Amino acid sequence: MPEDQDNSFQPTRQYLLSEGQVRAAFILSAVGMTALLLLLLILATAKPESRFVEADPTEFRQGLTAATSALSGYEMFEDGRARLDIDRAMELVAERGVQSPGMVAAGASAAAPGGAQEGAAPGADAGSGADDDEQALPAVDGAVAYGTCAACHQANGAGIPGAFPPLAGHAAELYQADPSYMIDVVLYGLTGQIQVDGVSYNGFMPSHEHLADAEIAAILNHVMTSFGNEEAVDSFEAYTEADVEAQRGLELSSDEVHALRADLNLE
């Protein structure tokens, strides 16, 4: 055998993946990663679609009926509005510990000093029908009774410009024009636009027919002897229960009271 012949084993190099396969795998992974990022971006910015489904009002109405079944004077209408008798509403406020809600409920004047007895008509004599030896109730304190009015017209009678007209000075003008008109305003309220000292007011004053004649007279006497009103009139004659009783029989509306104001030629 020739000496220059080499019979030793020469290994051959082999790879699991070729260069082309590695390149293809890299390109595919890059494309897949890009596609995944795009999908996540689309999902993050897409707005979910939803439809409005009207709720069944039956359960709500059943709950409302159960919750209000114990309320007397409560009435529910088909359009969702409700109505509660004002006397019952004031009773509920009192039951919750409010000592002075700012209004006097019907019949509440019986507990006030000088008010009518329970069950008596407004303005009736507190001592009528009582035993001869029963002590008469003291006169109504006008300053205390005026607390019903002070919530709007303020304790000093200055009112709130543009919202509630003042009584200081203006009450004297009303008295000079017609003393009985002030009784009408308290008894029946006032609806409509008015001008006081160049300021326009277009609110609503509620009726206070529930007050006894003695209370209304005391309130008006307090107003006319306070806030500088007494000095603004030529002479002032105190209101009496009889004065209020005479006007109570007119049964006016708040609109009619507003029309009467126009006849006073104040503006």
Image: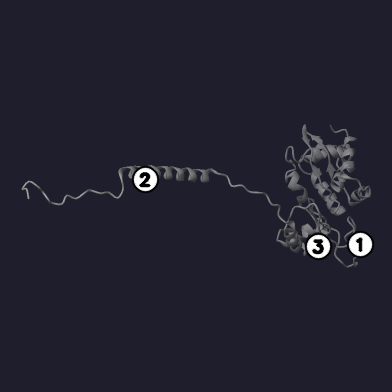
Residue at image location 75% in from the left, 51% down from the top: 147
Q: Residue furthest left?
A: 3
Give the percent coordinates (x, y) of residue 43. 52, 46
Q: For the residues carrying marks 2 and 1, which lies nearer the camera in this image? A: 2
Residue 192 appearing in the image = yes
Name the kind of residue labelled 3 in the image: Ser
Q: Classify residue 247 as left or right of residue 106.
A: right
Residue at image location 15% in from the left, 52% down from the top: 9
**Badge 1 element:** loop
Q: Which residue is mark 1?
A: 128
Tell me if label 3 and label 1 are in contact, CB under 8 Å: no
Q: CA distance from mark 3 to mark 1?
A: 33 Å
Give the percent coordinates (x, y) of residue 85. 82, 57
Name the kind of residue labelled 1 in the image: Ser
Give the percent coordinates (x, y) of residue 130. 90, 65
Front residue of 188 and 247: 188
Residue at image location 23% in from the left, 48% down from the top: 13
Q: For the residues carrying marks 3 and 2, which lies nearer the camera in this image? A: 2
User: Looking at the image, is mark 2 or mark 1 earlier in the sequence?
Assistant: 2
Q: Looking at the rendered structure, which numbered label has been put on residue 25?
A: 2
Q: Classify residue 24 as left or right of residue 99.
A: left
Q: In what quadrant of the picture does the C terminus appear? A: top right
User: Looking at the image, is mark 3 or mark 1 earlier in the sequence?
Assistant: 3
Q: Which residue is mark 3?
A: 72
